[in-house]
Amino acid sequence: MRCFFIFLLIIPLGCVNKIKDIEASYPDTFINDYGGDIQINYYLKGNLEFQLIAPEIESVTFPEEKSVFKKGIKVFVYDKELDTIATISADFAIRHKEQKLVEVRRNVILNNLNQEELVTEKLFWNSESKTIYTDDFVTLHTQNQIIMGFGFTSDQYFSTYSLSNITGTIYL
C-alpha cells in the first residue's frame, strides 16, 4: 500500500513540463502575430511612397514568412508632393516576404491618376522589379473605352501599362 502512494506522488512529478522544454518543442517559426485596424507606411528615400490600410493582418513565419490580409486591403500610392497617383483595393492579399511579391485577390480594383480603372480577380506586385501584372481576365475602363482581355503589365504606379490577348473593346 505504501509503494502505491509513493508511485502516485512520483507520477505527477514526471508529467510536469518545463517552459524551456515546451518552447523547444514549438520553435519560433510556428508563431503567428495578429493585428487589427492597421496602417502601414512605406517610405523610399525619406518620402512616403505607399500607404496600406487593412482591417487585419496575420504574420506567419512558417513554412515561409508572409503577411496575410484575410479581410482585404486598400493601398494609396503617392508622389513626392503626397498627391494620390494610384489606388488599389482587394478583398484578400498576401505579402510573400522572401519573393518580394504581393498577391491581391477577389474584387481587385486598380485606379490611376488618369481616372482609368482596372478590374480583375488576381493581381501581383513585384516590389523588386516595380511591376504589377496578371495573366487573368481583366477589364480596363478608360474615358473612351472598355477593353477586356487576358493579361496585364504595368509599372507600380499604373501610369504605363499594356494589355495582352485583348478579347474585346467597347468604345464609349
Image (cartoon, rainbow, N blue to C red):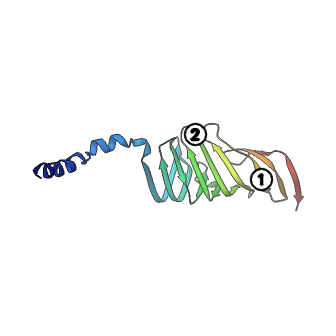
The answer to whether residue 86 of the structure is visible from this angle is: no
Q: Residue at x 56, y 60 (%)?
A: 71
Mark 2–mark 1 Cα distance, whole angstroms, equals: 23 Å
Residue that mark 2 sits on? 100
**Label 1 secondary element:** strand
21 or 51, nearer to the observer: 21
For label 1, count other residues whose C-alpha is less than 10 Å away and answer few (under 14), some (14-19) or many (20+): many
Q: Residue at x 48, y 49 (%)?
A: 59
Residue that mark 1 sits on? 138
33 or 148, nearer to the observer: 33
85 or 24, nearer to the observer: 24
- Residue 113 lies, with reference to residue 25, above or below; the image says below
Which quarter shows the C terminus?
Answer: bottom right
| Residue 41 as seen in the image, left or right of residue 131 | left
Counting from the top left corner in percent of width and height, residue 56 is at 50, 59
Whether the residues at callouts 2 and 1 have beta carbons within 8 Å, the answer is no
